[in-house]
Amino acid sequence: MTGHSPDDHDARTDGGTRTRDPPETAPDDFQDTGTRLVSKIPTGARAVRYAVAVGIAVLWVVPLLGLLMASVRPLEQIIQGWWHIEGMTVTFQNYAEAWTFKSGPMRQALFNTAIVTIPSVLAVTLLGTMVAYPFARFDFPVKTGLFFLLIVVMAAPPELVAMGNYNTLRATGLFDTYMGLILVHIGWGMGWVVMFLRNYLLGLPEELEEAARIDGASRYQIFKSIVLPYSMPALVSVAVIQFTWVWNSFFFPLVFMRSTDKKLAPQVLPLMKGRLQIDWGLVAAGSVLTMIVPIVLFLVLQKYYKRGMVAAVAD
């Protein structure tokens, strides 16, 4: 029996030519604007979901808007409330002062943060992929136990491992060094990265690897030519999340970094509040400078980030 498309029951033949009956309603392009708007109005549960999503978005956007408004206004106008826009004076003096702040210039702090963040993200992403692949493909005796251990480490609070890392870095001479802090971030991020990438790699068709092995490809060639390209959306998702966490991390730099010239951006921000009076414009400008880098990174890579997140959760 020959299969028919869903539209074939509406079609008829006339002298060998297949024709279709006209649709009962006009296409959207030929409808008036009012009708199209009415047809797009959500109803029922979808309207509730939209309302909840909009409410959450507003809760996030309003504080951000207040931060931006405070960063470009003098202190005397901020005290009256950032939402008062009558007679508002826009100035970038707060950014200039934060960039060259005496107790901790944001210029140097951002550079120090980049020194720690970039290697931490690259290393944990590459190592996480190399560890996640065996968990997704191979069977070995202690596989379940090791994976459970990774989950336990991921669930542990950072304060739990701070003392052990503190003593280790002291003993090895890596305390108050960029390398020591980078190693701490790599070890702390491996747990969730391996679990995330393992879930993603479970969706990789095994037939691709079997075909490559038949063609004589080694495990290294399969990993480099098939696994890594296939995992690119997940790797981007991991890199963006890990970058944000490391860039904004305050606890680990506070514990393991003491030198003034090595302070990271999250450490410098509290210094800007002063001792006698808090200059909220200066603090707001420093906060904007700190958060602008992760935001730009996410905006640039959001397409791959969404693909990786959806696939990892679905698998």
Image: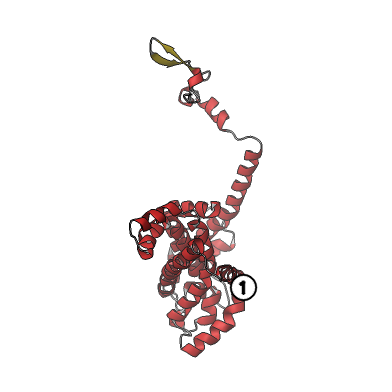
Q: Is residue 211 left or right of residue 268?
A: left
Label 1 residue SS = loop
Task: Name the spot of residue 302 as percent of width and height, x first.
Answer: 45, 53
Looking at this view, name the residue that lies furthest to the left.
216
Spot the residue most to the top. 15
Amino acid type of the residue that numbered disc 1 sits on in the rendered structure: Pro
> Where is residue 301 shown, x and y percent of the image?
42, 55
Q: Is residue 57 above or below residue 25?
A: below
Quickly name the residue at label 1.
Answer: 157
**Which residue is more in the foreground, 201 or 67?**
201
Q: Position of residue 112 (x, y in %)?
A: 42, 75
Q: Nearer the viewer, residue 50 or 135?
A: 135
Q: Is residue 98 left or right of residue 53?
A: left
Q: Quick check: can you spot residue 211?
A: yes
Name which residue lies at 39% across and 62% down. Answer: 223
Give the residue displayed 44% in from the left and 82% down from the top. 177
- The location of residue 140, given as percent across then percent down, is 52, 68
The quadrant in which residue 98 appears is bottom left
The answer to whether residue 29 is left or right of residue 55 is: left
Q: Residues within 10 Å of mark 1 (few under 14, many from 20)?
A: few
Up the image or down, 169 lies above or below 132; here it is: below
Q: How many marks?
A: 1
